[in-house]
Image (spheres, rainbow, N blue to C red):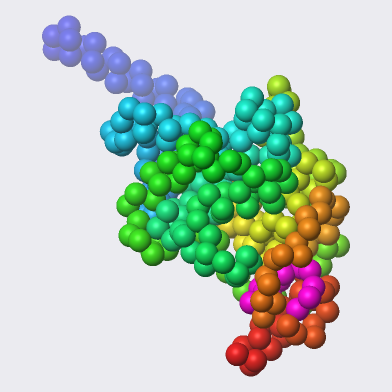
Amino acid sequence: MNTFELFTTYNYLFMIKLVKGNWIPLLIGVIIVWVVISEIVKSHHTRQQDALSDQQNTATDSTWVAPSLFLDPEPKGKEREMVIYGQNLIAHTAAYFGPHGSVAHSSNGMNCQNCHLDAGTRAWGNNYGAVFATYPQYRSRSNAVQDIYGRVNDCFERSLNGKALDTGSHEMQAIYAYMKWLGQSVDKGRHPYGSGLPKLTLPDRAADPQKGKEVYVSACQSCHGSEGQGAENGTHTEYNYPPLWGEHSYNDGAGLYRLGSFASFVYNNMPFGQASHLHPRLSQGEAWDVAAFVNSQPRPHLNQHGDWPDVSKKPFDAPFAPYADSFPQRQHKYGPFGPIVDATKKNK
């Protein structure tokens, strides 16, 4: 037997002796190593599944995908500058038109993207995907054909509780350019899947503001504040989280003051960063209730005597009289909405 064989044999016998004398700690060590490796493999598999799920969600959540300025070589030059400026105006409206705005002091301090998420690009987030393809269009609220400029100014006067923009202004033209660019792939007259807000199932009861308060405290208050005041950024130029009621919130003529719109917006998007159309965090009942709570709180009033000249075209959840039916104003605001809808169908 040569030196190498003697050395190998000695080490083998030594390991056997070591194992016999320390088999319990060795077994524990083997188990620990096995558990660690299993967890690593499991974690890797979970990440792969999550990535696959995210890809599937992206692929199936909407037929419309917003273009990206990082990937789209068009537009160029002045046109590109206008699109970029329009995007900034939507994302940071208050920095230009809020109480400390650089262009004018003419709005409540909210941003357009507080209601049209991700600067109007998020599927089911009240996006602008269908705007350029569907305007001008007849709107029953004004009983007239409205163009994009009029629709934008509706938001400035209602959701931003401010003043209308000059339609020929640099800012209005930039917003128009941005919306046109966003809808470049949508055929005229088409509403792609994922645009707007989906209709929720009507509850068979009235939405309950008191139950909604409980939902608000548990799911909304941490961002929007105990008094619905929102949370400003460090320079107080705009809100990181918008106010949901009070003098700096949307007025009672805004689209989100209708319960059906607000409930759908909440159900498909809130809490922010935690919920989505495919993975809602709240139940539909909770969404209706928290919408009722928020819209029961004080906010600015807008004279709406000119809205819906033809009262028979008013939506079921229009919160102010007069109506073409005999249902009380409170039922039009909080429900139950089923009887109102059924009566409207019968009278057509």
Task: Describe residue 134's horizontal placement relative to residue 282 as left or right.
Answer: left
Q: Residue at x 75, y 85 (%)?
A: 325
Range of residues picked out in magenta: 313-323
Q: Main SS type for the magenta part?
A: loop
Q: Residue at x 72, y 65 (%)?
A: 306
Going by the picture, which residue comes out furthest to the left? 2
Residue 209 x, y percent position in the rendering: 83, 63
Q: Which quadrant would residue 241 be assigned to in this image?
A: top right
Task: Describe residue 292's horizontal placement relative to residue 347 as left or right.
Answer: right
Task: Describe residue 37's horizontal placement relative to residue 215 as left or right.
Answer: left
Q: Quadrant of the C terminus?
A: bottom right
Q: Residue at x 51, y 33 (%)?
A: 170
Whether residue 316 appears in magenta in the rendering, the answer is: yes
The answer to whether residue 235 is above or below residue 161 is above
Q: Nearer the viewer, residue 67 or 270?
A: 67
Whether residue 9 appears in magenta in the rendering, the answer is: no
The answer to whether residue 130 is above or below residue 40 is below
Q: Which quadrant would residue 40 be assigned to in this image?
A: top left
Q: Nearer the viewer, residue 50 or 56?
A: 56
Q: Residue at x 78, y 75 (%)?
A: 322
Can residue 343 be seen in the rendering of this structure?
yes
The answer to whether residue 306 is above or below residue 152 is below
Task: Describe residue 332's horizontal placement relative to residue 81 as left or right.
Answer: right
Q: Quadrant of the N terminus?
A: top left
Going by the picture, which residue comes out furthest to the top? 3
Q: Nearer the viewer, residue 101 or 110?
A: 101
The answer to whether residue 294 is above or below residue 87 is below
